[in-house]
Amino acid sequence: MHSIEFAAAVLSGKRRILVFTGAGISTESGIPDFRGPNGVWTRVDPAEFTIDKYLRNPDTRKRSWQMRLESGALTAKPNKAHRAVTKLWRTGRMLSCVTQNIDGLHQKAGLPNKALIELHGNAGEARCIGCGDRQPTVDVVARVQAGEEDPSCLLCGGILKIDIVFFGEMLPPAATDLAFDLASQADAVIAVGSTLSVFPAAQVPFEVARAGHPLVILNMGRTAFDDLAAARLEGPAGRMLPALVSALS
Ligand SMILES: [Zn+2]
């Protein structure tokens, strides 16, 4: 493990820093991660939530909306780590933020849309599989709360689905292309709160490191790319990232 000072020294002079974020940046906002010791996948079988099952099976949809209702993610607030990313953006040294998260907390922390690539979509919107109509997820969840177990599209009766990438679905091509394009322009990358084990998303920070630029990893616990890291910080993102960004500004 390295110190904040060491990581800041690794990033000194870098002007096109790519920030890559995963579930670990949002755990301090009360959103459980997926693969940690208390992660969602210790309680729920991810194989239950493939796109095929979702489209075929009303029970899967029922459970999916119920989980959405109970998760609290729709009312979660950004934490100090999200705000630190916004602060780094405002210093002019950050190229962009690529996130695996679907919680919308970077936007809530003031990061402009043009500085954010959401590889796995955004849970704040629901989309009709049939006609493509979009509406706020809070409105659909309100229908669930009012007793509709599997709410369908009010326009065409089609299946409604949160606008996120399910297991078995492709990543959105435009966002993916843009993320890799940004990775090729970056002169450093900070990976925050990700085990860097979900592909192709984790390929984004990998590409920056492969081009010979420093990779700084901030995570609780090991990651798949620890051996590639120029600096490795261990600890809660809400404490470590503001300290790192302050050391850079
Ligand atoms: Zn529809």
Image (tube, rainbow, N blue to C red):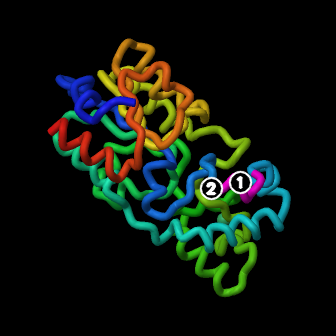
The quadrant of the picture occupied by the C terminus is: top left
* Depth check, front residue: 19 or 8: 8
Regarding mark 2 in the picture, which secondary structure is present there? loop
Mark 2, residue position: 38
Looking at the picture, how far across and down is residue 171, in whole percent? 59, 39
Q: Is residue 21 left or right of residue 52?
A: left
Looking at the picture, how far across and down is residue 86, in whole percent? 27, 49
Residue 106 visible here: yes
* Depth check, front residue: 18 or 221: 221
Looking at the picture, how far across and down is residue 165, in whole percent? 62, 47
Q: CA distance from mark 2 to mark 1?
A: 7 Å
Give me the disc on residue 42: 1
Residue 98 visible here: no
Looking at the picture, how far across and down is residue 89, in whole percent? 24, 43
In the image, what residue occupies the spot 58% across and 30% down? 200
Q: Is residue 185 left or right of residue 140?
A: left
Residue extending furthest toward the bottom: 146
Ligand 1 falls in which quarter?
bottom right
In the image, what residue occupies the spot 62% across and 68% down? 68
Magenta extent: 39-45
Q: Determine whether the beta carbon of the residue marked 1 sits less than 8 angstroms from the nearest atom of ligand 1.
A: no
User: Quick check: marks 2 and 1 in contact, CB under 8 Å?
Assistant: yes
The quadrant of the picture occupied by the N terminus is: top left
Q: Tell me the kind of residue under disc 1.
A: Thr
**Is 44 included in the stretch rendered in magenta?**
yes
* Depth check, front residue: 76 or 217: 217
In the image, what residue occupies the spot 79% across and 48% down? 47
Q: Decide: few, some or many residues near mark 1? Use Cα within 10 Å; few <14, some 14-19, many ≥20.
A: few
Q: Decide: few, some or many residues near mark 2? Use Cα within 10 Å; few <14, some 14-19, many ≥20.
A: few
Regarding mark 1 in the picture, which secondary structure is present there? helix
Q: Is residue 119 left or right of residue 47?
A: left
